[in-house]
Image (tube, grey):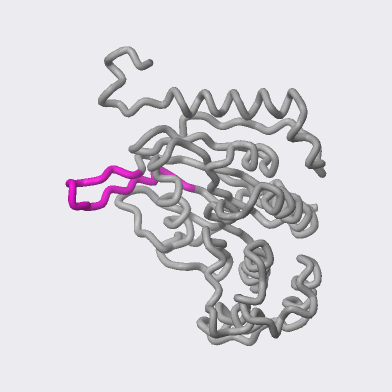
Amino acid sequence: MGDHTHEALRISGATKTYAAHSGVVHALQDVDMIVEAGEFISVVGPSGCGKTTLLWSIAGLHQLSGGRIHLGEDEIKQPHPSIGMMFQEANLLPWRTIEQNISLPFELRRIRPDRDRVEALLERVGLGGFGEKMPRELSGGMQQRASIVRALASNPDVLLMDEPFGALDAFTRDEMNKLVEEIWIEARKTVILITHSIAEAVFLSDKVYVMSARPGRISRVVDVPFERPRPLELMETREFFDLVNDIKSDIKHQVPPARRTTSAR
């Protein structure tokens, strides 16, 4: 079991504005979050509310305009070796084998890959023996399994997931959600997931953070009450359905501040 007694990540007053063709975009405003070590949280909200901006800032890939992000004692201003990331696409380089793709983050940091760990992870996600294959020889679901291995190979403390299963069919997506939960229970990483699927957020998370329309703020934090491990059948229960719908209606009623004065229908 992971140690839940200390925070892994502290986000204080995260604010982000950037210049676009249409003028200044105010993506995030005063976002505060404390994520405990070993916790699995999701961030959901209306389209364009700054979810991905927040995640990329935690990854050190975006600079904030205001506020701070700390991992333990370290302030995050650039990519951090203790933070791994999974993107929307598997992002495997087509000219490298699966194993060479998994080795890439190690090469960029000029450290030797932990071959035993990579082998064990490939086995764990059902890709044992696939290390020599090229990405085109794998299905979309298998490519995303490989990208889970790449994200976990360097044994990060925090794993960030940016809508990683959005392109997969519903059946494969359910399978991936189950796999991610199993790996999380085994390894107790701190995980932050961005997703458009409220059901995915509820199924996987300890807490679901709901963001307002832009500029993104945290409007609500939902504690997910279901015991773990969670069977896929949980998604068919009335309790699950009600919680998902409650969060959905919350997001639907988010109205940008400029329009809040009129009655929102």
Give the residue drawn at x 56%, y 62%.
Answer: 86
16 magenta-colored: yes
User: In screen coordinates, is 179 left or right of 95?
Assistant: right
| On screen, residue 175 above or below 234 | below
Q: Residue drawn 26% across and 52% down?
A: 18
What secondary structure is the magenta-colored segment mainly?
strand
| Image side of residue 125 versus residue 138, left or right | right
Up/down of 217 relative to 102, above or below: above
Q: Is residue 138 left or right of residue 257?
A: right
Q: Magenta includes 104? A: no
The magenta stretch spans which residues?
11-27
Residue placed most toward the observer, 75 or 133:
133
Residue 167 vs residue 78, the one in the foreground: 167
Q: Is residue 155 visible?
A: no
The image quarter containing residue 113 is bottom right
Residue 64: x, y in percent?
34, 54
Instruction: Residue at 71%, 49% (x, y): give it.
Output: 171
Residue 16: x and y in percent read 32, 48
Expressed as whole percent of the image width and height from the top left, the position of residue 181 reads: 74, 51
* Residue displayed at 51% across by 82% down: 108
Q: How many labels sit on residues?
A: 0
Which quarter of the rendered picture does the C terminus lie within?
top left
Pick the residue in front: 265 or 34: 265
Give percent across and percent down for residue 141: 66, 62
Asked whether residue 89 appears in the rendered view, the answer is yes
